[in-house]
Every structure is written in structure tokens, then in C-alpha cells.
Image (tube, grey):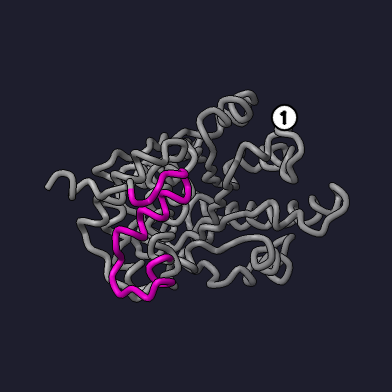
Amino acid sequence: MSEAASPAPDAPKSFRDLAFKVPDDVFEPLIQKYCRDLTELARLGKFDPVIGRDAEIDQVITILLQRGRSNVAVCGPAGSGKTALFTGFAGAVAEGKVPKMLKDARVIELEFPTMAAGTTTRGEFEGRLIPFIKGCGERNASKKFPPIILCIDEMHTMMPTCKATAASGVSDILKPYLTVGDLQVIGATTVDEFRQYVAADPAMDRRFQKVLLEEPNVEATIRIIKGLRPKYEQHFGITIDEKLCEDLVIIATKFLRKQNNPDKSIVTLDQSCARAVKKGMETLEWVCVAETVGNQTGVIPSAIEPPSKKAG
């Protein structure tokens, strides 16, 4: 096997040991300004646990390990937790729960709106983007370091046919790097937007494999909310009963029909806890949940009773 195919035994310990066309003193500030280093944030414990998505994260890992077509398009309805897979995968890397090829990978979320902020011409925007893409590509091509993996939310916005977005046409810049395998991307979008924008370009479509994310059912959402409960208790300094978590998910699912789980149940829990804190409560009470749901639907809070009460 050639040296380019696997890390050399005396591989340099720093990017500075190689003469890259985009040196560290240019590349690192681009990351700091326009991206989020998800693996570093995961190591610092900045993310909530990703519950019930082990199979999907495993699919992402399998695709990234492939020699060809090793880019991921996470597709699912709004609020189903697509971008949570970014943090879930970054958490797996941070905890060392990935194969050797992905060990210590740097998972970076590229934020196109942030990169475009303050620019007045397309040239200014590309003047920031192209050095960043080149920097990622040449570091990955060196094969001497763990891979840099880019996460792109709303990936359809980078297609030329998606007008009126800062990222429109960015896909043409990424294509050469995706073709030779110097870039690996995890994108997120809805199934319809993938079909309308990404799949319409056969060259981009064949570079990505879809990981379909379905809205979790009530039972799965309850497990997610119960798993997040300690984080919310710690943040708000209140106690949250497990039975209330079950009732909250059932009511959010029933009344907030235009939204999807787990997002709508998580938001309902968050807002309900905020109301409890405002009222000086030490325990989250049902009245706060009823007021939260009532505020979003126009239903009188007193008419929203916990399902467990009716069952009793």
C-alpha cells in the first residue's frame, strides 16, 4: 500500500508540519469565524443527548467509511431531528465510539449565512468559501490526519436552482472535491427539497446516499423526553415528574398537528418549564403545560387535561 493510502508511521503531529496552500493561520480563523467545531463542543458537553437515533447514526458512520459515494444526505420532515444527527455523530466521535478510520475526526458545521454576512458581492463570499474548502480538501487528501467532515444544514440551498440564498451555486465549488473524495459532507434537508433541488442534478445526486429520518411515534418521543428530563431539571432547577412527561407528549402530539415530534414535544417542555420558573414553582405542574399548548393553539388551558387523569 502506498504512503498516500495510509498514514505514515512518522506522520506529523500538526497541520503546520505540512506545506499546505491554505496554511493554518488562514484556515483556522475561517473555522472560528464561519463554522462550529461540533466535536469540540461535544467534548465540552454542550449538546443534549441524541436518543433513539442509534440506527441512523450507524448508517451515517457506514456511509462515511465507504471508499466511494461516502457523503450523507439526512432527509426527513421539519422538526424530526435531522440536525441532531450532526451532534449525535460528533458525540460518537468525541466519545471514541467510531471505527479507527474516523477516530478523532473533526466534525465541522459550515454556516453559509454567517459566511455571507457583511459581503456585498459574490466574489467576497467566494473569497471566504473557496480557501476554506481548499483547506479542508488538501488536509483530507494528505491522509496524514483524521478526516475533516463538513455538516451542512439545509443542503438544498447550495444548489444553483435554489435562488435567493447566499449559498446558491456553492455545489459547483464542492463538486470537484466530492468527486475525488477530498471532501466528506453530511447534509440535511427534507425529502421534497432533496428531490426538487439535489436529485435534479445527477452529478450531485450520485455523490450522496440518503439516510431517511422518520418522525418518531408517541412511545419513542416519550423515551426522548424522559431522556432529556435531567438536563431540563438541572437547567431550570425544578423537578419534572415522569408521568407528566408522558402526558405532555400525548397532548403535544394531539394538539400541535402542524408540527413534528420530537421537536414539538421538546419545545413544549422547554416553554412549560420557563412558565413554571416564572411562577416560582419547584415542580413542573400541568397548568404550565396546558398554558403552553393553549397559547399555541388558542384552546382554553382549563380544557386541556392530562390524559392520565382521564384514564384514572
Which of the 4 image quarters holds residue 58? top left
| Label 1: few (<14), some (14–19) or many (≥20) C-alpha neighbours in 10 Å | some
Q: Amino acid at mark 1?
A: Thr
Residue 218 x, y percent position in the rendering: 28, 41
Q: Residue at x 31, y 73 (%)?
A: 238
From this view, report whether residue 198 is shown above or below residue 48: above
Give the side of residue 34 with respect to residue 195, left or right: right
In front: 33, or 162?
Answer: 162
Q: Is residue 19 visible?
A: no
Residue 124 x, y percent position in the rendering: 84, 54
The count of marks equals 1
Q: Is residue 34 visible?
A: yes
Which of the 4 image quarters holds residue 25? bottom right
Query: How would you classify the magenta stretch by its main secondary structure?
Result: helix
Is-magenta flag for residue 255? no
Q: Residue at x 72, y 29 (%)?
A: 161
Residue 38 x, y percent position in the rendering: 50, 62
In front: 274, or 95?
Answer: 274
Task: Provide the residue designation for mark 1.
Answer: 161
Q: Residue at x 60, y 47 (%)?
A: 182
From this view, report whether residue 110 is shown above or below residue 254: below
* Secondary element at tag 1: loop
Give the side of residue 35 with respect to residue 233, left or right: right
Q: Which residues are magenta?
A: 275-302
In front: 213, or 210?
Answer: 213
From this view, report whether residue 28 is shown above or below residue 302: below
Is-magenta flag for residue 287? yes
Residue 113 x, y percent position in the rendering: 70, 53
Q: Residue at x 72, y 56 (%)?
A: 115
**Which residue, as the protein is rendered here, is positioned at the far left?**
312
From this view, report whether residue 91 is shown above or below residue 73: below
